[in-house]
Image (cartoon, rainbow, N blue to C red):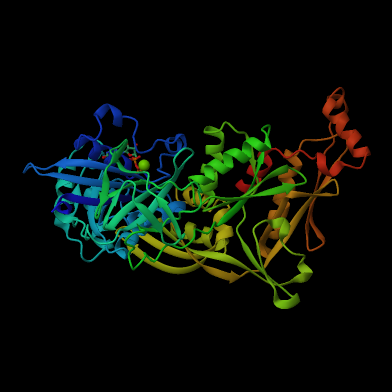
Amino acid sequence: DRQKYIRNFAIIAHIDHGKSTLADRIMEMTNTVSERDTAAQLLDDLAVEKAHGVTVKSRTVRNYYVDDRGDEYQYNLIDTPGHVDFNYEVSRSLSATDGVLLLVDATKGVQAQTVANYRLAKEANLTIIPIVNKIDNLMADVDKTVEEILGLDDSFTEEEILKISAKSGLGVDAVLTAIRDRIPAPTGDETAPLKALVFDSKFDPYKGVIALVRLFEGTLNTTDQMLFMAADLTSQNKEVGVFAPFTTPLAKLQAGDVGYIVTGIKDAHAIRVGETITSVAQPTPAAFPGYQMVQPMVYAGLYPRGTDYKDLKIAIEKLALNDAAFQYEPEQSEALGMGFRGGFLGIFHLQIIRERLQDEFGLDILTTMPNSTFRVTLKQKDEMVMVENPTQFPHFAQIAKVEEPYVHAKMTLPNDMLNDVMRLAEGRRGVLEDLDTLGSMLMVTYKMPVSEIAYDFFNELKSVSHGFATLSTEIADFEASDMVRMDIAIDYANVDALTFVLHRFKVEKFAQDTVTKLRDLVPRKLQQMPVQAIVEGRVVARENIPPLRKMAAKGTKVSKKQEQLRRAGQAKSDIELPQEVFDAILDMG
Ligand code: GDP
Ligand code: MG
């Protein structure tokens, strides 16, 4: 009977369609927080999230809702992230819920990630409450948005689509009653053996691993001995509780509840999302199937710039504790010194990490050109190697085959932009897979190499579509590609940080663009320095960095020192590479 008054749900939406605003409104209308507290959007508390307006880490909040009959319900709201790079976090949060609010901005209509999120919810067999948001906006086209939502799913009816303004609160009452009436209450035996799913985790330097869980069966008391089935670890429970929205310890969690567990485990990487927690005394016979390990899609070097390597190391370790998708290992570059190779879900994820290092840790860092993974089959012994760093790309004479990861890239766009978008996708080696209409919009799916998406595809898509097109990606598989390695030599010395792997048909243009940018951006020296792009032993493009003018050079200490170094034959290590060099190369795509 206790479970009758519990609802576990999430809000899913395309970015900026109002998820955080609706979450705030729900917390406010259930008196979870006062109006003043919500001013700064409680759920988005990291500095980066504010800057980007997206939610990076999931937050689970328990609200108490008293309905018109005077019954009190526990509304567990699980906030999900809203960007393409974070789809894996969405699906893992969804597995803890029984239903979702599918929010669509009436000024924008159904977008690529509305569709992607809808599919995730459908696959998880969740109850879906479709909602049109921003009906207060003068630009809102409510009827058209309703049509588009109906086009998503044959089983939707016009009557069930709610129309609201999350901003003003108009219609949000009906959302609260729909959660009660449409989303099923959890079931699960409170006296059965404990079976809890870990759908997120945080690391606290004092408390260790804090797991966010949904209990499907049984009861967990503080001080219980727990068994982590996938990790095969036992530990004594230290504390359980909920976020309401602040940390609130409780005596126990029971089947149907969503909450946190202070696991007492100090190894930050021991507990993975998808872990099953049961009790040592009475273990459950069946663990959850578990989740796939998150695979980084994009790699880039992270180097300290005017900051200490040790400080960067500490900051990176801290970041990784709370971001299971971010991977790293130490790396050494001749040009840039000691640093790290980071693995990211996508370019946006890389940007977030870079900004967090700056904003939260005050570090000035340099990030190199991102690249995707390559699977290289060597002629000798038919050996296969995975290459995450272009400098490790084997010599062309040894290579039998190169493969690279592909994604299905789904885009929504207005009809009249199809030609521009097709030209863009095909220029990026995209192959058309599907073309469909969605209301007045088109849905186009291309199979594309990750390496092509990684180089700023999203920004270009936005630009050719005047901001209208949207993108969501799904990992496909590895396919053979004619990739080659391009080295850059400045003053006849290879600069390892400027090593690229790219498709053969891009070589000519990319090589010329790169040497031109380097000519303009690499700090000059007293002597003229050639910049060469080298592919398979041939110079494919060349420019000269002009010498500093004599007048300007006079009295500049740095140049003198560099000149000495050059005479000592150490020219290789004294090329200065400002961040602008990498940014400029990334920009030209
Ligand atoms: P999220 O990315 O889905 O979390 O979206 P946000 O909640 O951050 O909202 C994105 C923007 O839309 C913000 O500027 C909100 O103030 C605005 N917004 C959200 N809901 C409404 C609404 O109902 N009406 C109007 N006019 N603006 C809204
Ligand atoms: Mg948000």
In the image, 136: left or right of 554? left
Residue in the picture at 43% in, 38% down: 49
578 or 140, which is in the foreground?
Answer: 578
Q: Position of residue 214 (x, y in %)?
A: 31, 53
In the image, 208: left or right of 533? left
Can residue 265 be seen here?
Answer: yes
567 or 268, which is in the foreground?
Answer: 268
Q: Position of residue 208 (x, y in %)?
A: 46, 43
Q: Position of residue 495 (x, y in %)?
A: 78, 48
Residue found at the very far bottom of the displayed protein: 381
Residue found at the very far right of the displayed protein: 567
Q: On the image, which quarter does residue 247 sit in?
A: top left
Q: Quadrant of ligand 1?
A: top left
- Which quadrant would the N terminus be assigned to in this image? bottom left
182 or 131, which is in the foreground?
Answer: 182
In the image, 500: left or right of 343? right
Q: On the image, which quarter does residue 156 sit in?
A: bottom left
